[in-house]
Amino acid sequence: MIDSWTLILGVIFSSIGLGYFIYGKRQQDLVVRLCGLALMLYPYFFDNHWVVLIVGVGLMVIPRYFKI
């Protein structure tokens, strides 16, 4: 069962993911675009708010360290 914190974190990370996706599309950066897509989709698969938080922060950091 999903609690309110998981729902709020899902909305926040999905919004950030939309920003990453649009930025990656405009800059032609595949890593940022894929991380944005992952940020928008992953909250549907986890129902623990700690997992949602850790995975979200991890996906937000990936484009900083990996470039194609």
Image (cartoon, rainbow, N blue to C red):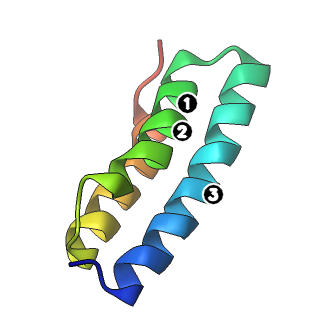
Instruction: Work out which residue is located at the far bottom of the displayed protein and give it.
Output: 4
Q: Are marks 1 and 2 in contact (CB under 8 Å)?
A: yes
Q: CA distance from mark 3 to mark 1?
A: 14 Å
Q: Is residue 64 above or below residue 14?
A: above
Q: Is residue 61 above or below residue 38?
A: below
Q: CA distance from mark 1 to mark 2?
A: 6 Å
Q: Which one is earlier in the sequence, the residue at label 2 or at label 3?
A: 3
Q: What is the three-letter code of the residue carrying label 1?
A: Val
Q: CA distance from mark 2 to mark 3?
A: 9 Å
Which residue is at 27% across, 77% downward?
49
Residue 15 screen position, x and y as percent: 63, 57
Q: What is the three-letter code of the residue carrying label 3?
A: Ser
Q: Which tag is nearer the camera, tag 1 or tag 2?
A: 2
Residue 6 placement, left or right of 49: right
Residue 64 screen position, x and y as percent: 49, 39
Q: Secondary structure at mark 1?
A: helix
Q: Which tag is nearer the camera, tag 3 or tag 1?
A: 3
Residue 53: quarter of image: bottom left
Q: Which one is earlier in the sequence, the residue at label 3 or at label 1?
A: 3
Q: What is the three-letter code of the residue carrying label 2?
A: Gly
Q: Which residue is mark 1?
A: 32
Circle number at residue 15: 3
Q: How many marks?
A: 3
Q: Around disc 3, counting alpha carbons within 10 Å, would you say few (fewer than 14), some (14 to 19), or many (20 or more)?
A: some
Q: Secondary structure at mark 2?
A: helix
Which residue is at 47% across, 12% downward?
68
